[in-house]
Amino acid sequence: MFSASNGKPDKLGVTYSSKGANFCIYARLAESVELLFFEDKDADAASNIFKFSTNDNRTAYYWHIFIEDVKPGQLYGFRVNGPYRPYQGTAFSPKKVLLDPYGLLVERGDHFSREAALGSGSNIDTCLKSVVVDIDDYDWQEDQHPRHSFYKTVIYEMHVGGFTRHQSANIAKKKRGTYAGLIEKIPYLKELGVTAVELMPIHQFDPGEHHAGLANYWGYSPLSFFAVHREYSSDRSRLGPVNEFRDMVKALHAADIEVILDVVYNHSAEGGEGGPSFSLRGFDNNDYYILSKDRQHYMNFSGCGNTLNGTHSVVRRMIIDSLHFWVDKMHIDGFRFDLASILSRDELGAPMLSPPTLFSIDTDPILSSIKLIAEAWDAGGLYQVGSLAGQRWREWNGHFRDDVRRFVRGDQGMVSQFANRLIGSPDIYGEHHFEPEKSVNFITCHDGFTLNDLVSYNNKHNLPNGENNLDGCDYNFSWNHGVEGETNDPKILQLRNKQIKNMLTITLLSLGTPMILMGDEIGHSQKGNNNGYCQDNPAFWFDWSQIKKNRALFDFTKGLIKQRTAIYLNPSFRYSLHDIILRSDIHWHGVKLNQPDWSECSHSIAMESTHPHSGVVSYVIFNAFWEVLNFELPISACGKWLRIVDTSLVDGNDIYKSGDKKYWFNDQYLVAPRSVVILIGETPDD
């Protein structure tokens, strides 16, 4: 049926053509390689086995073969044999069927067994299988990248499965938790007003990778850096997930929404010592992973058992090839790099001043127009917020998250730090002359409390995760406002709601690129669990019935995003933080004009700024104190101050919308306890 020839080492992975397919892998120390074909996902034996010749099918470190008449959808895998030298870091398992590291789809049969991938025995009847894909067989029509600049970007971090998996999503059951389901909810995203979705990992992972009957819900454990996650597709045909994912991207682009992928180029699903051999370990363990000096152990800077050797030339090429694939073939607009600081470590794990992988990504021409966002730390103690290599990288600002939480909670000595966070963190980024949008400002993300839980719990409640409440962060800077968890006390509920609005307002007003977490706009709660990585159940999915219940909060969030251009405090979209400070476009005040209180016991600050292009003057008051404060107002050049936001007011009156009654103020404003007020200088209508 099939005939084989030498093939070429030109391109790793499968290169498909009308005549067949070229298969190419990197296996530097391998002594023999076999390509296996399978009839179906549950086949217990290979239908064809092609043995590579060391003379004809090997060039340097690359093994290659061309198989005529291969069709898209063909299932395949590799077996690789080589020297067993534990003291040199090799880990060949010649009986194991391995996934193609560059495979574009993964098929998981009904009899797949993670346990069978352990040890040295055969897994041929339970293995994962790669799929041949004709990646160019898709009509993108007139698809265009939205290309929003960072200063116009509002990011919505979301979980593809959790967004529409709840029965309240009111879509066909087949589409719940899928790319197709997300397409149906694009009108919701448009109404909210976000300009980009940041998708938690959609690279193929094993949903069953956990213990005690729980699931791998988040997906931060990739099996492949090129394959879309099959389980998020409503089209369960062998090739269906690739095109359904592209349908989703195309539909989001048509709605002027960018697609950012959360990518995990810091570790793989193979774990540490004793972990399964799915792919990389069986091809070249020593090159793909950072090992200890004695080559006996995996360095664990990821907290997940292993760490990719991102500085190695082959791994660096794989990462960049993967990024190119997602941009070129899948039309992705940007990437958020999980634990990006790992890519600044050398092959022994030591931090480098000029890490080649991060700089290669930063300067790559194919990636020059896409967004690069880094989680600038790792699980090994490296924290590089403000110092990650590369000019184009933006960073999740962990200082913003923690300092805003502490200020809003009412902690002592937080006014100065809070003020820095409001204006783009010049204490972190200013000396480098970065623009304010270098900082991705967030208070909540997938990792930690939701905004509702942040104001409802003093402590994490992670017992359902099966780890004796030892998992998840202990430093949440949260406050339950008097009762731990749910309550019917109207005063506590009112205060919690106000604090949620305070933090949404701060996130969407501060200089930088704002990011909000899926569900925060409707008061989603995870019952105090701040580490829902293993909780694939309705309590952690987006509950669409909550929109009606918490419509006021949704409308407030939508209103903030809509008003962002007018009330956004960036005094110039094109000046660096250094220029902003030198130009003195920001003026600080306290309850008395020009007298900001920077003392340890202060809990309030006011900020006045003028937009150089529109001329709009804004005056924003942040009162984290537990008593009413009467703030003096400067004389407005426009005559009076129009109230845009007051988070202490009842729902519906807390944010100005076009057509609403206007409220004007002259020389003072009585600011309620724990609230934020935004005023705009404007000439009253006569």
Image: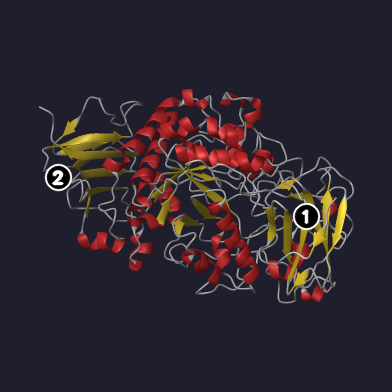
Q: Secondary structure at mark 1?
A: strand
Closer to the camera in the image, 575 or 37: 37
Residue 554 is marked as: none
Viewer-nearest residue: 538 or 65: 65
Which residue has dot 1 on it? 68
- Front position in the image: 516 or 605: 516
Task: Point out residue 422 in the picture as x, y percentages from the top left corner.
Answer: 33, 51
Q: Residues within 10 Å of mark 2 (few under 14, many from 20)?
A: some
Judged by depth in the image, the label closer to the viewer, 2 or 1, is 1
Disc sitting over residue 634 in the figure: 2
Identify the mark nearer the N-term, 2 or 1.
Answer: 1
Is any part of residue 189 visible from this angle? yes
Q: How far apart are labels 2 and 1 at the CA level?
A: 78 Å
Task: Indicate the amino acid at tag 2.
Answer: Pro
Residue farthest along the front direction in this orientation:
19
**Rendering quarter of residue 356:** bottom right
- In the rendered structure, the answer to whether residue 99 lies left or right of residue 670 reads right
Query: Up-down: is 98 above or below 183?
Result: below
Mark 1 packing: few (<14 Cα in 10 Å), some, or many (20+)? some
Indicate the quadrant where residue 80 lies. Answer: bottom right
Q: Nearer the viewer, residue 648 or 104?
A: 104
Q: Residue at x 56, y 50 (%)?
A: 262
136 vs 375, left or right, is: right
Q: Amino acid at mark 1?
A: Glu
